[in-house]
Image (tube, rainbow, N blue to C red):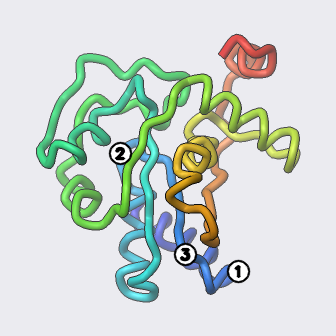
Amino acid sequence: MIAGAGTLTLEILEECPRLDALVVGVGGGSQAVGALSVARHLRPDLKVFGVQAERASAIHDSWHAGRPIARDSADTFADGLATRNVYDLTFPALRAGLAGFVTVSEAEIAEALRLFLRATHNLAEGAGAAGLAGLFKLRDTLAGSSVAVVLSGSNIDTPTLRRVLSGEL
């Protein structure tokens, strides 16, 4: 997983060599760790920001606390972000490398998903739209920067997609 995420970051940097920041959704953390690994070797100045669902925020909360914190639930429609614990393989790298880490609400994730559909005609699952939701949260921090978000995954079931499109989420 981490190597694949690193490849994704390599491809982004090939297309956008002057990129200042990358905003990625964090479930277990492999996508962000892949980005951090590539950045460390090729672009140490590239800032990587993590985004997690506020209703599944174990890794976010742990990152800010500086120590692992487990949560009793991970209740988010963005199932790729639904983690209740940190992972030994990814947490130290996230802790050492992320430039920042924010949470986003279910409504913010749903709005990002709808925006991807309207603007790019691409369907993302909740976890795949989290980077865009996080970018909106980070707009003041990243104003004037060249920023990429990762649009990934379209594993969203029809009932959830209906709820997103109807504005229930």
| Kind of residue indicated by mark 3 | Asp
**Upstream in sequence: badge 3 or badge 2:** 3
Q: Position of residue 115 (x, y in %)?
A: 78, 39
Looking at the image, residue 21 sits to the left or right of residue 93; the answer is right
User: Mark 2 sits on what residue?
Assistant: 28
User: Mark 1 sits on what residue?
Assistant: 15
Residue 95 vs 27, above or below: the answer is below
Looking at the image, residue 13 sits to the left or right of residue 114; the answer is left
User: Mark 3 sits on what residue?
Assistant: 20
Residue 11 vs 139, above or below: the answer is below
**Upstream in sequence: badge 1 or badge 2:** 1
Residue at mark 1 to residue at mark 2: CA–CA distance? 26 Å
**Upstream in sequence: badge 1 or badge 3:** 1
| Kind of residue indicated by mark 1 | Glu
Tag 2: Cα neighbours inside 10 Å, few (<14), some, or many (≥20)? many
Query: Mark 1 or mark 3, which is nearer to you?
Result: 3
Answer whether labels 1 and 3 touch (C-beta < 8 Å): no
- Residue at 26%, 37% (x, y): give it: 61
Q: Camera-side residue: 34 or 96? A: 96
Q: Position of residue 150 (x, y in %)?
A: 61, 57
Query: Mark 1 or mark 2, which is nearer to you?
Result: 1
Looking at the image, residue 144 sits to the left or right of residue 91; the answer is right
Q: Residue furthest left?
A: 67
Q: Describe the element under mark 2 as helix, strand or loop.
A: loop
Q: Position of residue 59 (x, y in %)?
A: 28, 41
The dot on residue 109 is none
Q: Position of residue 83 (x, y in %)?
A: 34, 32
Tag 1: Cα neighbours inside 10 Å, few (<14), some, or many (≥20)? few
Tag 3: Cα neighbours inside 10 Å, few (<14), some, or many (≥20)? some
Question: Which quarter of the picture shows residue 13?
Answer: bottom right
- Residue at 66%, 52% (x, y): give it: 151
Residue at mark 3 to residue at mark 2: CA–CA distance? 24 Å
